Image (cartoon, grey):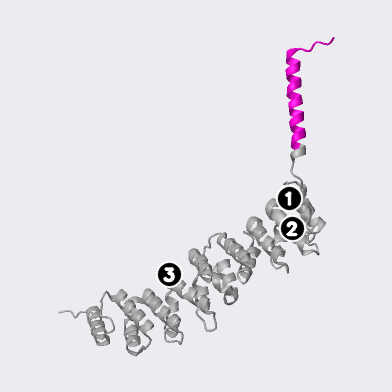
Amino acid sequence: MITWSAPFLARLGVVSAFAAGLSFAQESRPTMPPRPADVPELAWTIRILNSEQSPDAPKLARSHTEDADAIVRAQALMTLAEMGSDQDAEAFLAHTDDEDLLARRRAYDGVLMFASQRAEAVRAAAVGLTAKDGWILERALLILTAQSPCTRASDDPVAKAIVSMLTEIEPSVAPAVFDVLLLRGSATGAITVGLRNGVSKPIMLAALNAAGTSKEQTAVARLKVLAIGRDPLIAARSVKVIGDIDGVRSLDWMIDRLETEKDVSIRDEIAIALRKSTGKMIGFDVPAWRRHAATLVAASAPKRKK
């Protein structure tokens, strides 16, 4: 009769428990759901490997970023955006204009993750601002905000790319686009383009706000033209921005506009601008404003030596 030692029996118990646990884990492992009928086998394989974080997933994905099937392409780009590396930058950049929306989305994901500092990424992001898709618009803005600060505003590649596409961008992102440029200190060119005739109203309003925020002195002449235009909202906003930028330097112009303007909303904006720039609460009293302007001129005149 074989006699087992106590230590051996203990070890045997541990091994048995481990084997039982492994068997239970294998039996209880959830089975993958069946492949949807509209998903190609290849795309499904890449997806499964991706979900398991298999090192084979990016290898297989890289060989199918140019697949003729849009679903396979999109799945390949999605996997690389999650498990890829800098070596996949070219593939992402190449598909930011893919004919398939999902593939384009995944390409912009990849550019943001692995190619945002490439020069081509700035151009791709500027083009992305023209998209009607919210996902691409968000990624495009994130790519632009990820760019390194510019040393000279006139040489800023972000500003140059945005200016070239400004009249075509999705109007809803115009405020965010100008915010990006204001933070970079390179909004002048975009403000100039944004205030031109023919630009959509949301983009022009965003340009007006940016001009006021940056105190863009070069915009004042154009703003004075817009302030007598037919659109009351644009005219009123232009008056406000002129006041913010020019202050008392445009005092006589403001008074002249107050005297001739008939639109109530614009007259209100003129009166507010006059009060802010002078500290006087004279309201709509044009003669009183002219008397006050005269006192400012007299006060600023050089005094004669005795």
Mark 2 and mark 3 in contact (Cβ < 8 Å)?
A: no
What residue sits 34% from the left and 80% below the top? 268
Mark 1 or mark 3, which is nearer to you?
1
Q: Secondary structure at mark 3?
A: helix
Which of the two labelled residues, at mark 1 and mark 3, occupies the earlier sequence position? 1
Instruction: Kindly identify the amino acid type of the residue bearing the numbered disc 1.
Output: Asn
Label 2 CA crowd tier, 10 Å (few <14, some 14–19, many 20+): many
| Magenta residues (range) | 1-25
Instruction: Kindly identify the amino acid type of the residue bearing the numbered disc 3.
Output: Thr
Label 3 CA crowd tier, 10 Å (few <14, some 14–19, many 20+): some
Judge left or right: residue 292 versus residue 138: left
Instruction: Tell me the distance, in whole angstroms, between the alpha carbons under discs 3 and 2.
Output: 43 Å
Residue annotated with mark 3: 213
Residue annotated with mark 2: 75
What residue sits 46% from the left and 87% below the top? 230
Q: Secondary structure at mark 2?
A: helix
Judge left or right: residue 160 versus residue 26: left
Residue annotated with mark 1: 50
Q: Secondary structure at mark 1?
A: helix
Residue 15 colored magenta? yes
- Quarter of the C terminus within the rendering: bottom left
